[in-house]
């Protein structure tokens, strides 16, 4: 199978191309797309069959939860409950590469949560990623666009051929910044917890909460 590739502007995404990609997601399809860190894999996280396809495309074990990206803080809150402290982090770092783990709201496919009750979500600093979520009308998944065990990809030319063959559409906006993945944090009753180090230093996160 030959995957469809759509070239798209990273700074002024063409609405018709974004809408086409969102249509693929509504139909249960898989879209490879750019974020402010690396390329990601998007499906509609409310569709269980689509999420299963994501696991198959990536070769990922279903015990691993899937992060989401949103177009706005409000859209992020529609997927997971952003409390006052999470809202503080959102004001400090969104749009940007900080992911927060929050209680999931109803409606997400169980496989997205990997049997848990929380979801990881952020608003990225990339217009294509935000436009895709806006057009869908809901957050999209954003796990890195690589087969499990392989390095993440910053440029579409580096995408794994097998991964591409299993996807339905690639939004090619050229190179992404190629920085570290997003920092993932969780604000627990015991205090802030660093789930995964990444593009935003942990010290900056702690400072923003003071």
Image (tube, rainbow, N blue to C red):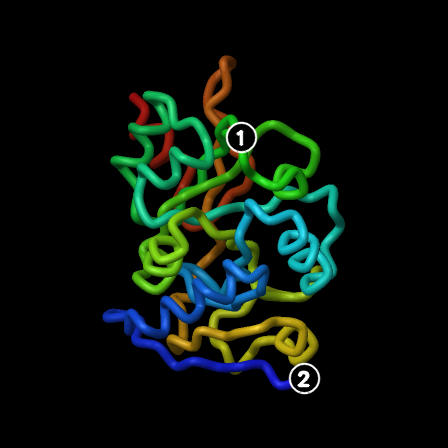
Question: Residue 21's image quarter?
Answer: bottom left
111 lies left or right of 138: right
x, y (%) of residue 119? 54, 35
Residue found 33% across the figure and 50% down from its top? 71
- Quadrant occupied by the N terminus: bottom right
Residue on which disc 2 sits: 1
Query: Horizontal and vertical percent for residue 15?
Result: 29, 69
The answer to which of marks 1 and 2 sits earlier in the sequence is 2
Q: Is 7 in front, or is 86?
A: 7
- Residue 210 place in picture, x, y as percent: 29, 21
> Who's the residue at 28% across and 73% down the image?
14
Q: In which quarter of the image is residue 7?
A: bottom left
Q: How many residues crowd around disc 2 within 10 Å: few (fewer than 14), some, or many (20 or more)?
A: few
Residue beneath disc 1: 106
At horizontal 32% and vertical 21% (from top left) the residue drawn is 84
Percent x, y of residue 165: 66, 78
Query: Circle 1 — which element?
Result: loop
Q: Is residue 39 visible?
A: yes
Look at the numbered disc 2 and give the secondary structure of its residue.
loop
Location of residue 108 by image quarter: top right
Q: Distance between the residues labelled 1 and 2?
A: 35 Å
């Amino acid at each position: 199978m030959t995957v469809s590739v759509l070239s798209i502007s990273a700074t002024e995404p063409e609405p018709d191309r974004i809408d086409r990609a969102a249509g693929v997601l509504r139909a249960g399809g898989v879209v490879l797309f750019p974020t402010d860190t690396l390329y990601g894999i998007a499906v509609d996280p409310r569709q269980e069959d689509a999420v299963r396809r994501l696991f198959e495309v990536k070769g990922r074990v279903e015990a691993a939860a899937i992060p989401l990206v949103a177009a706005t803080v409000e859209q992020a809150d529609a997927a997971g409950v952003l409390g006052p402290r999470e809202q503080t982090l959102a004001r400090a770092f969104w749009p940007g590469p900080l992911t927060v783990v929050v209680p999931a709201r109803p409606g997400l496919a169980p496989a997205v949560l990997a049997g848990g009750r929380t979801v990881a979500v952020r608003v990225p600093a990339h217009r294509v990623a935000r436009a895709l979520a806006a057009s869908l009308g809901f957050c999209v998944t954003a796990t890195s666009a690589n087969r499990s065990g392989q390095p993440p990809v910053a440029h579409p030319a580096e995408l794994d051929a097998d991964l591409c063959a299993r996807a339905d559409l690639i939004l090619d906006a050229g190179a992404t910044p190629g920085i570290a993945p997003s920092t993932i944090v969780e604000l627990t009753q015991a205090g802030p917890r660093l789930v995964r180090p990444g593009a935003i230093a942990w010290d900056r996160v702690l400072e923003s909460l003071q």
